Image: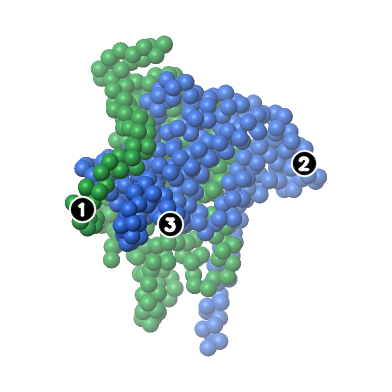
Amino acid sequence: MNHDAPRRHRSRDGAWPLVFLAPLMIGVIVFYFWPILATFLNSFSSFGPFGDRSFAGLENYRTMLTDSFIPRAVLNTAVYTAIVLLGIPIAVGVASLMNQKGLRLSRFYQVLFFLPAVSMPVAVALVWRMIFNQEFGVVNWALGLLGIEGPYWITSPWWALLAVSIVGLWASLPLAIIILSAGLQGIPSELYEAAQLDGAGSLQQFRSVTVPLLTPSIFFLSIITAINGFQLFDLLFAMMGQANPAMADTQSLVYLFYSEAFRQNDQGYASVIALLILLIIGVFTLLQFRMQRKWVHYE
Amino acid sequence: MSERKHRTVRPRRITHLVLMLGGLLMVFPFLWQLSMSLSTQAEVTSVPPTWLPSEPQWGNYPAVFEQVPFLNQFLTTVAVTVARVVGQLLLCALAGYAFARMTFPGKNVLFALVLSILMVPYQIYLIPQYDIIQELGWLNTVAGIAAPGIFSAFGTFLMRQHYMGMPRSLEEAARLDGASPWRTFWQIMFPLSGPALSAVAILTALASWNDLMWPLIVATYDDRTTLAVGLSTLQGQFTTDYPVMMAASFMAMLPLMILFIVLQRHVVAGLAHSGMKG
């Protein structure tokens, strides 16, 4: 940070910082700072049918420990996140193919791989729901060609989770490719020339130049992909539908939060789930930062 | 020589094959959606699939407007998106400038506090935000759907980064002429913020247009909610009318998609920024 002559500025800025910051800060305090505190307080409260609240101590926390939906939701969310993370190696492959020097049609490919990034998750979820339809969906038709009888994707819990995860992976690819392309463009071409002089083939160049130099981007990408994965809601909600009987066994943590908070109107318990989500994301991100020393190469 | 040429041509062919097939897989849902939206119900549910309608059913599109309050939802979505984009551009630019260029007690602590918002998953905010909107009597209004999203820590961060990187000499001259910081900002700094503003605008428009959870809880009336919410509740009601559902979902995302394909380069740059959110 450069503060050239901070003292000189202080007197001249006067009350101006207040004028510039007040509009944002009022909203930030009302809609973000206060809610953090309120959610924390809510987690110790129980709410009556008419919104009347009373102090409940640790009751909501105790409920969570015995709620069998919680471990299932954590598991579902983890499975989804793990499958979506598999998109990163795919994206590394696609991005390095796409960013070869002088590749014709590269702009065209960019548009193709980029479309899901600007599409509405709910809208594409409805299309994917059709694609995975057990009777007339394209997936089961294709499986049928191979002599396999396709499963009931949308109504059986594990298959539904797999279907939603595949769509999540598909939807996560564009951003991954964009971030990795930026990383690839930052690799100096001399390194490839040097590797070529050493007699390295293209596969070996990929392994010993591209991948190591891309690890900072991959690390960064794995963190945001995981955080986004833990936020699974839109795709699940729109692909499964609220009335789906399989939802109880397919739901993510965020869906469980939503249904407790706004369907069951149990805001106290929902606040505990929100805090659990915060805890899981925090611990996971911390672990990833700890582990980065082992595999991320910074220049 | 000829052997080496051979070696470089070969992999390229495989490259194109892989990218072409992969790309097809990426756009297949959109093409399939378009095709189904112009098909009859019988064609959509046929086995094996009918890839193209024998005769395009253009009537599926007007039917959307009869079956759901699509126009209302569209206008609501546009209004919310415009409110959020304009609001964020103004507020984030102002605050970002103050954080980058002004000196006041507690600046760094305050900025760190604002950034800490980004590290907290939004479920933490959701219930109290809902309570506030309810208290204000803003449920089922554009104001209620737009309000929390107008205030953005991430947008402020991007704008601050942008102003940190601008030469100080620009505003020094204006200040020496006796212009107030307010005038200096609006006449000199804000007009020079194009790239940063476009990144904030693109990311906000995308998030706002596609947002599901927030409008789902604060706008529960069919004719006062956004397209995303309208679509997500469609399938319960119209399980039998798939082509109309496809037409509705296609129309819902078309405006933003066209806009963003036209602005492709800016969008890619903007999305590359969004990575920093983590």
Tell me which amino acid carries mark 2: Trp
User: What is the number of the mark on residue B192?
Assistant: 3
**Quarter of the figure with the C terminus of chain A:** bottom left
- Kindly identify which numbered label has been placed on residue A8: 1
In the image, what residue type sits under mark 3? Leu
Chain for numbered disc 3: B
Within-10-Å neighbours for mark 2: few <14, some 14–19, many 20+: few
From this view, report whether residue A286 is shown above or below residue B129: below
Extreme residue in the bottom direction: B1
Q: Residue furthest right?
A: B55
x and y, in percent, of residue B104 in the image = 23, 44
Residue lying at the far left of the rendered structure: A7
**Structural distance between the alpha carbons of marks 2 and 1:** 68 Å
Find numbered disc 3 in the image and state the secondary structure of the residue it sits on: helix
Query: A7 or B36, which is in the foreground?
Result: A7
Q: Residues within 10 Å of mark 1 (few under 14, many from 20)?
A: few
Q: Percent x, y for residue A68? A: 37, 25
Chain A: colour as depicted: green
What residue lies at 72% left-to-right and 29% top-to-bottom?
A: B66
